[in-house]
Amino acid sequence: MRECNVNRNLKRCNCSYEPCSRKGICCECIAYHRSNGELPACYFPEDVERTYDRSIARFISLYKG
Ligand code: SF4
């Protein structure tokens, strides 16, 4: 079984929510946000990421023409 690349994932993780236990464990991160109708931090630019609004509606609003 392949090892999780937690340390490599953490190097490119932009999530500013420090207490999260899912940081660097991308499979848990996406499953958690998906179950809440959201996307993970890495789908959002820095300024939006910091608002912690990870809703799909917010994501779509970023790219609407
Ligand atoms: S995006 Fe969400 S689940 Fe992923 S590390 Fe940040 S707070 Fe945790």
Image (tube, rainbow, N blue to C red):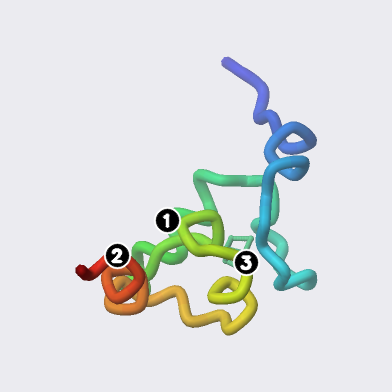
Residue 36: name its quadrant. bottom left
Left or right, 39 with reference to 47: left
Q: Residues within 10 Å of mark 3 (few under 14, many from 20)?
A: few
Residue kind at label 2, given as amino acid type: Tyr
| Ligand 1 sits in quadrant | bottom right
Residue 28, position in %: x, y?
53, 52
Residue 40, position in %: x, y?
49, 60
Give me the residue at 57% from left, 15% from top. Answer: 1
Left or right, 5 with reference to 34: right
Q: Camera-side residue: 33 or 54? A: 54
Q: Camera-side residue: 53 or 5? A: 53
Would you name the residue on which mark 1 appears? 31
Would you name the residue on which mark 3 appears? 46
Of the image marks 3 and 2, the number of the one nearer the N terminus: 3
Of the image marks 1 and 2, the number of the one nearer the N terminus: 1
Left or right, 26 with reference to 9: left
